[in-house]
Amino acid sequence: MGKRQVSVTKTVATTPEQIFALLADPAKHPELDGSGTVQAARSGNPSRLELGAKFGMDMKMGAPYKIQNTVVEFEENRLIAWRHFNGHRWRWQLRPVDGGTEVTETFDWSTARTPLLISLSFFPRKNKQGIERTLARLEQRFAAA
């Protein structure tokens, strides 16, 4: 896996603005997460993310832990990505298409401090499954809208 990233794309029946509003609000991240690891937004987070913003989450993967993220890519209603201390990124790209928005979520560990270890671990496969469930949740959220 030379490019060190996994992505899933799905078309969601809503506008990029509506999806971006969820992504830019860290308090909404637990509602979207299909992996089951994002438990709650930490207190003190900004109400809306922007480039350089820092936000914390309560997480659980086996044991509970806390994570601090930094927004490292940001283009209003089109792109948002954040990373934490290990350097890997979670990226969301939005593109308007007929019938809604093409949403691509990517787990990118090419920028991680330990990319080889991540490549050899279960994380790429597990995260791809989580992304698939997250995008299905997003699709369901707007299916009745």
Image (tube, rainbow, N blue to C red):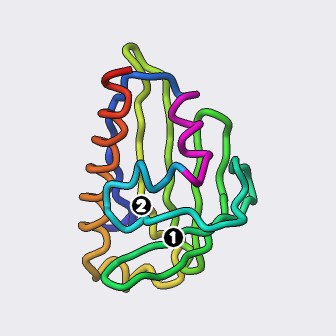
> Which residue in the structure is indicated by mark 2?
107
Name the side, left or right, on which 9 lies relative to 65: left
Residue 137 in which image quadrant? top left
Marker count (numbered): 2
For the residue marked with disc 2, what is the amino acid?
A: Phe
Give the main secondary structure of the magenta stretch.
helix
Vertical order, 79 against 130 (above or below): above
Circle number at residue 31? none
Residues at marks 2 and 1 touching, judged by CB atoms closer than 8 Å? yes
**Residue under the point 30% across and 68% down:** 124
Residue 119 in the image, given as x and y percentages of width and height: 33, 77
Secondary element at tag 1: loop
Residue 59 in the image, given as x and y percentages of width and height: 45, 73
Q: Foreground residue, 50 or 86?
A: 50
For the residue marked with disc 1, what is the amino acid?
A: His
Residue 125 in the image, given as x and y percentages of width and height: 24, 66
Residue 57 in the image, given as x and y percentages of width and height: 55, 68
Name the side, left or right, on which 64 lies relative to 119: right
> Which residue in the structure is indicated by mark 1?
88
**Residue under the point 66% across and 66% down:** 43
